Each structure stands twice: as C-alpha cells, then as structure tokens.
C-alpha cells in the first residue's frame, strides 16, 4: 500500500537503467578527453617541437661499431635548445664522420703550439668527428655568422686560466675564417690579448687571471705550488680591466688543485708575504669566489653586461678512473669513455658545488656553462704528448714516454669547440 498524498513514480526496468547510465558515463568521458586534448595542443608549456637530427644518414654495414646507425624512418622528438629547459650535461657523444671542424691548426693562425696537436704530430683524427647530443634537446651547430652578429658592437672577454685561454682561442678560430684578412687583427699580451673583428666593431679578448683573485704567481709564475700565496680577499687590481665589457666569461679551477693546502693571505703583499694562513682547498676556493661574486654584484650592471661562468674542465691523469688499469694518464687514448655518467678523480664535485652555492646567492644573474660532464668522457681529446711544454716541442723519444702526456689541456680544434657551441646557444 502507498500512503495517500504520495505520487507513484513509473517503474523502469533494471537493464534499461544500466544501459542509460553506461551511455551517460561514456559520453562524459568522451567530452572530458576531447577537452584534455584541446588543452594539451594549445599549451605552450607542453608543446615540444619535432626537430630533425643533424647529419642523419644511413651507414654501411662495415662501419666501426662506434659510428651512428640511423633508421631513415626514425624521428628525433627532442625539443629545440632552451637554456632553462635543457640539461645539456645529460647526453652522449656520437661518432659522425661527416662532421668536419670549422678550422684546423694550420688554417687558424691564432692557436698556441701547446694546443696544436696535428701540427705537433698527432696522426689519428677520429677525435675530431664526435658530436655531443643532449638527451632532451637539439644543440644547434656553431654558426660563425650568427656568433659575430650576436657580439656586433660588443666586447666579449674571457677571464681565467689556461683552460679559459683554450676556450678563447677556440672561439676566435671558429669565427675568424669568415672574416677577410684585412678586417681582423690580433694583439697578444702577456696578460691581456685582443682579437678584433673590425667589420663588426667587436672584440674577443682574454685576460689571464688563474685564481680570479690576486696571488704572487699571477704574472711571474712560480712553479713550486708550495711557494704560491693567494690573496683571497683582493681582486680590484685585476678586475679594473674587466669593466666596460658587454659579455664576461669567467673560470677558475685547475690552479687551485695542487693537492696541497692553500696558503691564503689577507691584505697587501706590500707588507711582505708573512702572515698567511694554510686553508683547505675548498675553503680557500669559496673565499676567493665570494670575493669575485662581491665584485660582480657591486660593479656589474646586469642591464648592460651578461656574466657567464664556465665549470671545471676535467683532468684525466688516472687511467684507472675509466678502467684502463694498464694505461698511463690519457696516453694513447683514441675513443671517449662510453660508460654513462662517467666521473673521474680529475673533477671535484665539492668544488663544483661551491660554485653553485656562491652563484645562487648573487644579485647579478650568472649563467653557468656546464662543460664538466660532457668533457669527462673525452679522454681521447687532450693535447697528450702532442704539445710543447715550456715552449719546446717534444722529441720522438719524449713522445713515446706516457709520463710526458698533458691530460689537462685540449687539442684545437676539439672539445673546447663544443664548449663554445653550448655558449653560443646560451647567448
């Protein structure tokens, strides 16, 4: 019985109710999914462009195993390089024989013999045909015309040690080939060297400051690290030459890594070299970098000057680091390390973290050119025995001695060209 006053609802059979409910749910899902697709296709944050991989060619079956074998139908879905989005250190070296350097150590007259490996007798050339491919993005090839356009009317100054000089000479050589002979010049100095691209009213300069802060071995180099003293709180005498510059690129690392505690001094050398204090390397490095950071923050106008810092260039002095227990340093190495994320004893992560922490606290933005991980793999690309220590080329007998191998500096052309490829992409 139904109580009076209550309306009786029509009955619906159970199977019919289930069918209606199912149809409603399906329609709801379809509408929701179509809206989601519309959102993704219009979102600028999630839109990744499909980029063609450079130099994709089918390789013959008899190519060496390290060479790239590309499926012609394979599509590279990495996105275009964006400094804030792409972790350039995450990637791999790919052998590509079709790649040719933009210069040689005979076509570029500005390379020190210390880096002129081919001119000094190196006869294997595979090290010239490796390209760095980031995992997530495409890294554009170095374009000399674009580089000159970006620095037109500007001063570009590299400041640091001999590895920074390595990078500076690389940059000069990469762009100088498209400049007519009468429209370029080079003036070399003991401390400050200047290359001029007259047509572009641009200069590409290098300033020797191995610690960035001052020391008693900046100008008159002291060979014995035990006698070197660093003024960790003083930079102005050197830094007065870095003002009025449009693009500054700094580095400092290898000179701090003597394996000893650092003799640090506060105040002036005018009062003698007594009163120094021995500090752990990382502590002294941090004090020196803070002095540099304070100078940048107090002197540089970020609206007029861009500041970059190149991370440490690894030394490859212990072949056991990459599993060659019978080797000596980087002597006779002809291929990169293939182990992913290889990290040897020549790069100090503690020192690298000091750079990150100091830069993070700065008011002036500093862009980090992260070259450490990509260079860690390249045990094959150092000057090795094809160098001129002390300005004298090694004899044939001396080149046969692995202990004479320079596993700190790099051949040019070579790995520093890849550093500048990253640098230009960041510009």
Image: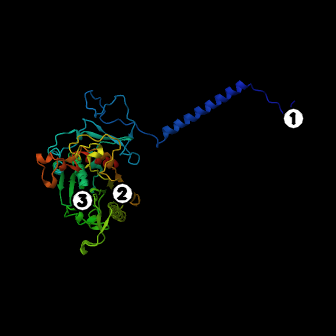
Image position, residue 148 (x, y; %)? 26, 49
Other-residue count near label 1 (Cα within 10 Å), few / some / many at <14 / 14–19 / ≥20: few
In the image, is residue 98 above or below residue 401?
above
Instruction: Decide if residue 202 is in sight here.
Output: no
SS for tag 1? loop
Could you give the CA–CA distance between mark 1 and mark 3, rounded to whole angstroms?
99 Å
Which numbered marker is on residue 355? 2
Image position, residue 129 (x, y; %)? 25, 39
Q: Quadrant of the N terminus?
A: top right
- Foreground label between 1 and 3: 3
Q: How is the image coloured?
A: rainbow
Q: How many marks?
A: 3
Could you give the CA–CA distance between mark 2 and mark 3, rounded to whole angstroms?
20 Å
**Where is mark 3, residue-wise?**
207
In the image, is residue 373 above or below residue 300?
above
**Where is mark 1, residue-wise?**
5
Residue at image point 37% right, 44% down? 90
In the image, is residue 370 above or below residue 18?
below
Image position, residue 102 (x, y; %)? 22, 42
The front one of 2 and 48 is 2
Decide: marks 2, 1 in contact (CB < 8 A)? no
SS for tag 3? strand
Other-residue count near label 3 (Cα within 10 Å), few / some / many at <14 / 14–19 / ≥20: many
């Amino acid at each position: 019985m139904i109580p009076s006053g209550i309306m009786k609802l029509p009955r619906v059979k159970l199977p019919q109710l289930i069918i209606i409910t199912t149809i409603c749910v399906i329609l709801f899902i379809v509408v929701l999914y179509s809206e989601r697709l519309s959102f993704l296709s219009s979102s600028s944050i999630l839109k990744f462009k499909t980029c063609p991989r450079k130099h994709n060619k089918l390789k013959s079956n008899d190519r060496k195993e390290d060479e790239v074998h590309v499926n012609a139908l394979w599509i590279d879905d990495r996105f275009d390089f964006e400094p804030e989005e792409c972790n350039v250190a995450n990637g791999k070296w790919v052998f590509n024989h079709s790649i040719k350097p933009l210069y040689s150590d005979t076509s570029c007259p500005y390379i020190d013999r210390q880096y002129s490996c081919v001119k000094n007798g190196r006869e294997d050339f595979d090290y010239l045909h490796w390209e760095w491919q980031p995992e997530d993005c495409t890294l554009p090839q170095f374009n000399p015309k674009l580089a000159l356009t970006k620095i037109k009317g500007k001063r570009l100054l590299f400041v640091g040690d001999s590895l920074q000089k390595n990078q500076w000479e690389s940059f000069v050589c990469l762009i100088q080939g498209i400049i007519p002979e009468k429209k370029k010049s080079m003036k070399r100095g003991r401390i400050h060297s200047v290359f001029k691209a007259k047509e572009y009213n641009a200069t590409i300069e290098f300033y020797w400051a191995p610690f960035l802060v001052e020391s008693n071995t900046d100008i008159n180099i002291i060979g014995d690290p035990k006698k070197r003293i660093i003024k960790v709180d003083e930079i102005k005498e050197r830094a007065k030459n870095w003002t009025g510059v449009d693009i500054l690129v700094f580095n400092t690392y290898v000179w701090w890594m003597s394996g000893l505690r650092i003799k640090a001094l506060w105040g002036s050398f005018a009062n003698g070299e007594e009163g120094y204090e021995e500090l752990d390397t990382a502590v002294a490095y941090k004090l020196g970098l803070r002095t540099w950071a304070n100078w940048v923050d107090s002197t540089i106008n970020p609206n007029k000057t861009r500041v970059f810092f190149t991370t440490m260039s690894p030394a490859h002095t212990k072949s056991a680091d990459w599993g060659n227990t019978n080797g000596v340093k980087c002597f006779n190495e002809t291929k990169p390390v293939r182990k992913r994320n290889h990290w040897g004893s020549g790069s100090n992560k503690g020192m690298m973290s000091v750079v990150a922490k100091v830069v993070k606290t700065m008011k002036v933005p500093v862009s980090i050119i992260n070259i450490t991980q990509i260079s860690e793999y390249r045990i094959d690309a150092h000057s090795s025995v094809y160098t001129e220590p002390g300005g004298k080329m090694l004899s044939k007998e001396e080149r046969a001695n692995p202990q004479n191998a320079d596993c700190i500096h790099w051949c040019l052309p070579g790995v520093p060209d890849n550093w500048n490829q990253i640098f230009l992409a960041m510009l």
